[in-house]
Image: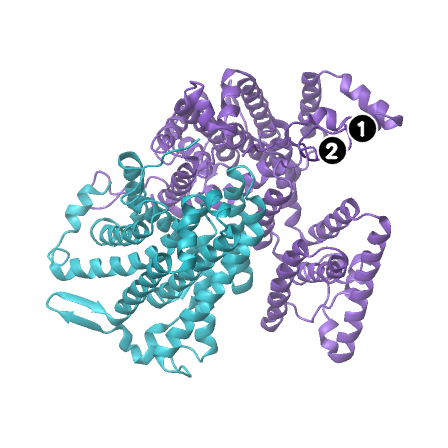
Chain colours: A purple, B cyan
Amino acid sequence: MAEPPDTPQAPGAREPSEPRIGVDEWVASSGERIQAYAGVTGRVRRGFDRIPVPLRFVALGIVVALVPVMTSNQYFLRVGVVSLIYALLALGLNVSVGLAGLLDLGYVAFYGVGAYGYAMLSSSKFGVHWPTWGALLVVLAVSVVVGFLLALPSRRLVGDYLAIVTLFFGQIFYTIAVQGYRVPLIKIHGSHDITGGPNGIADVDGFRFFGHRLTTNQAYFWASLIAVAVVFLAIHLMNESRTGRAWRALRDDPLATELMGMPVNWLKLLAIAVGAGAGALAGTINVASLHGAFPDDYSTPILITIYAMVILGGVGNLFGVVVGAVSVNVLLEVLRTPAHARWILYAVILLGLVAKLRPWKALVAVLAGTAAFGIAVHAIVAAAWPRGVHGLVSISGTDFSHGGWLGWALRHWLVLPANTYEAGNYRFFNYAFVLLIGLVLALTVVRGWARWLLLVPTLWLAAFVWETRLVEEGTGPTRFLLLGAILVVLMATRPQGLLGTHRVEIA
Amino acid sequence: MGGLQVLASFDSFTLTWHYFFGQLVAGLTLGSLYALLALGYSMVYGILKLLNFAHGEVFMIGSYIGYFVLTALGGAASPDVPAVLLILLMFGAAMIGSGVLGMTVERFAYRPLRRASRIAPLISALGVSFFLQQTATLLFGSVPKQYDTFSLNNGSLFNRITIGSFAIQYMQLIVILSAGALMVALIQLVSRTQVGRAMRATSYDLEAASMMGIDVDRVIVFTFFVGSALAGAGGVMNGLIFQNVNPYIGFNAGLKAFTAAVVGGIGSIPGAMFGGLAIGVAQALATGYLSSAYQDVIVFAILVVFMLVRPSGLFGAPALQKV
């Protein structure tokens, strides 16, 4: 009988990217490591590796802290503040999802509890203006208690029930926030306005620390940076402690953890509550910097956004989720302006092709084939239906609509019908979009030469769909389509995200 | 909440049997819709132990398919075919379309994750759900599409049959009866046919079933098809009753159907049916007597109470974990 397949082979004999049970990852990737340490880049990497890890983070923190000094562009600073708030949210969600393995789908409600709690305690809504420290403490305490209460009914049950309860809870929070302007609490006739309903709560005080009122984006940037640093450190220390080890054990095998005598229920409650605290802190910063709390900022799309950040960065990896949060937020910001967003698709496609297509001849063939395919289709349509190619690229008044080399190239390569926004033209888009989804799905199934053949029309169609409509709706469906796709595609291809470590599942 | 408002809102009209039966019938109608949806959740959960978050979105797409069939056949005001045939065609197309969609979702989003960690397919499901919702927004627009079934046969479908203080619209009767027929068909399918036996075996023990020569992948695909087809039928019913469809109906209906499946005992087919009806009636009575704005809160309260008191649901067996 041949030797069983799981026996350790010579190091480097297998693909180093997929660790198997019984083969140490470190041993398996030794060849890769030796290669990586050679040459000039190797010397730089060795030097970098010698810097102690805490020092690297301090250096990174100092560089980020200098950003408001280097730029006074208020837009950039605001994007920075939002990125840091998302980083805080991602860190908190990472505790329950990444460390303890609990699917908390009501996380956005804790963000909302923090936001609304702070808004109620320090605004002219009820004429209450608490000092910032007091409001922060009370809000954090309340959100932690809410987290406890929420996890309580599902503590005895499998993780899936927690997902339902929390998802529903998130929806309930949104309902209450929107409907809370007519709560019939004490008065029999008439009702109380508690959350301001769809209009939210305006006129919220900013933070005030040690007698200083934070008013500028700079100030909030630093405040949220400090919050991220503190939460990062706290969660890191927690992760390295007994509790953190217990969480990871719980994530990897709840039953074994329980049999080892660990307080499983308490650990679950704690993970949800710690996450809730971080989420609420992010909520207070958001409200204080915006001077208002609005229900749509605390609804499901934000939840999906945070999940995409955590998954993309790498579940369970603290630095990874921060990177994921910042990069997804910056990506979403870029999507706002079609002229900037246009490049994203082409850059992503090129990067993907360069990384995945081997040998390079195949890469050249696919790119040339795609270009030829587009030109051919353009020529046919131009002959049969001239109006079909009279469209311009982008309508947002950028240079590309009339010139620019990319705009010029796209006009001669894609079929862009005149008047993209005529109702009839949406139909082309709809068919193309459905066809594109079908082609992408088919690409995952077919193998060999059929795949190369299929790749060509897929790329062209992707560009067509992108240019005719998606690029213009970067704030609407496009961003959410992208986030949904990130979740599905990453789960299927790289569940550990960009920076996470691959876990071997033992069935 | 709302305790005092409740007393204030009880006037002579809301305290009649007529009003009560009206709410009850509305609740049963809504409940049979939830039951159809809950069946899909429950069946998939029974086999794969996976909460298929995308199920609500399949329901929404089914509703759109019904709308497009209706429009293609001339619209409700002047249909090209008799009303009965029209409704049958809408059901047929929506069920097949949704079934195929459900199979596609299973094939591309869940099957690659069959051996992944427990949390991975859930996140994937969340992504699929969101992706489908946004695709519908993009393709069909966020403005609701009008079924306008009220003008079908000059509105005669919304006439009432009245027996004493009990009254029911023909449309409600159609929905309740067709949902009942589908459920009977499902029970027959699961309990009498070969594929039904394979489904039961797979849901009892997937690994053992595959060792007994059952093609588990095919059973799973079939389960997704059947569950999604039921959701599609539910979508058409939703359109018939509420007269319109928008891309966001799936999320909320999905949550209610989840709750129904949990209340009934997730994994149990009679449980899903009963749970659906119970949630529908509870929601309608809550809307009628307490507050329409907070009906979700009341359903949520039911869910939490059930999880505390009887986590395995009404019909479910307590979950034993074998090692």
Q: Quadrant of residue A58?
A: top right
* Image: B45 above or below A221: below
Give left or right: position of B166 versus A220. left
| Residue at image point 72% right, 30% down | A70
Q: Quadrant of residue B226?
A: bottom left
Residue A475 in view of the camera = no
Q: Position of residue A138 (x, y in %)?
A: 39, 24
Provide the residue designation for mark 2.
Answer: A16
What's the distance in space between the residues labelled 1 and 2, CA to CA? 9 Å
| Residue at image point 43% right, 58% down | B195
* Mark 1 / mark 2, whichever is N-terminal: 2
Give left or right: position of A216 versus B33. right
Question: Dot 1: what SS?
Answer: helix
| Residue at image point 71% right, 53% down | A342
Q: Which quadrant holds the N terminus of chain B?
A: top left
* Image: A127 above or below B18: above
Q: Which quadrant holds the C terminus of chain B?
A: top left
Q: Along the line of sight, which residue is nearer the eye, A314 or B222?
A: B222
| Residue at image point 36% right, 52% down | B38
Give left or right: position of B232 versus A4. left
Provide the residue designation for mark 1.
Answer: A31
Residues at marks 1 and 2 on the same chain: yes
Protein chain holding label 1? A
Q: Along the line of sight, which residue is nearer the eye, A41 or A13?
A: A13
Q: Position of residue B82 (x, y in %)?
A: 36, 82
Q: Position of residue A363 (x, y in %)?
A: 82, 52
The amino acid beneath tag 2 is Pro
Q: State yes or no: discs 1 and 2 in contact (Cβ < 8 Å).
A: yes
The amino acid beneath tag 1 is Gly
Question: Dot 2: what SS?
Answer: loop
